[in-house]
Image: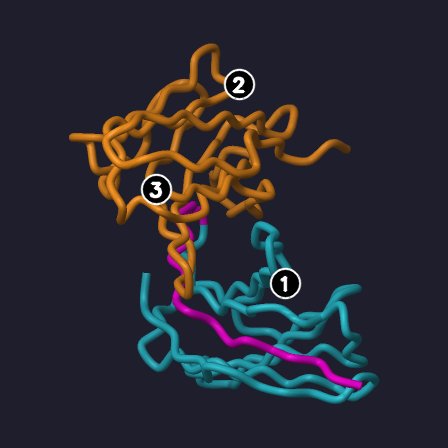
Amino acid sequence: EAGVAQSPRYKIIEKRQSVAFWCNPISGHATLYWYQQILGQGPKLLIQFQNNGVVDDSQLPKDRFSAERLKGVDSTLKIQPAKLEDSAVYLCASSLVPGQRTYEQYFGPGTRLTVT
Amino acid sequence: DAKTTQPTSMDCAEGRAANLPCNHSTISGNEYVYWYRQIHSQGPQYIIHGLKNNETNEMASLIITEDRKSSTLILPHATLRDTAVYYCILRTGGGNKLTFGTGTQLKVEL
């Protein structure tokens, strides 16, 4: 079974520029997550989608970050304008819809963003 | 989700068992103990989870104390490829949010 795909793998931009990341989840996984991982820290959830609706975006800096999941499959995460502190790895994960049991999250390889 | 406490780093000789501890003294009755690991430059990978009984799968064993205030992840025969950061996470049944701490950096050496 194909895993979670992300692109690009690396991106270098200057501060105040914009950037977008793409994620394709595992087929059949209705729940999609975006995490931010700053060097030396564990991943932090930015936003969670179920199908194409937002379940949790409480930690998403909405003044500069946006995310969408059109048609409930692929997703894009955008940063505009970028700041130096946005330098991090952005991880996408997917899972079956949590219900009475909790399903494992499967992570992609991440996109490493460097803001200069 | 309640918090967990893990050592910052551990070393293990290849072929020996790696025992990674996790303290979760404020765990609630409906919280599961989950373990993920993250190999360098990769996304986190699910390892195992349990509620109160000990669990074993092809990757590892999970030992949870009777009072559920601590647990130990056991990699029975560690290899160099097990070098990674290991995260112990509490999740409620049916809950979907993963709250990562800083984990334990396990280094397996020859």
* Amino acid marked by disc 1: Ile
Where is residue A92? Give x, y as percent.
50, 38
The answer to which image quadrant residue B57 occupies is bottom right
User: Quick check: A34 above or below B45?
Assistant: above
Q: Which chain did the image draw in orange?
A: A
Residue under pointer 1:
B48
Where is residue B58? Give x, y as percent.
79, 64
Labels 1 and 3 positioned on one and the same chain? no
Q: Residues within 10 Å of mark 3 (few under 14, many from 20)?
A: some
* Amino acid marked by disc 3: Val
Which residue is at a point 68% across and 36% down the rendered structure image?
A3
The span from disc 2 to disc 1 (Cα, nearest Å) is 27 Å
User: Relative to the observer, which residue lies in front, B92 or A106?
Assistant: A106
Which residue is at a point 45% across and 64% down the rendered structure image?
B89
The answer to which image quadrant residue B18 occupies is bottom right
Letter of the chain that mark 1 sits on in the rendering: B
Letter of the chain that mark 2 sits on in the rendering: A
Query: Which secondary structure type mostly characterizes the magenta part of the structure?
Result: loop
Labels 3 and 2 positioned on one and the same chain? yes
Indicate the secondary structure of the residue bearing disc 2.
loop
Which span of residues is magenta-colored? Answer: B94-110
- Here the colouring is by chain
Q: Which chain did the image draw in cyan?
A: B
Which residue is at a point 77% across and 74% down the rendered structure image?
B80
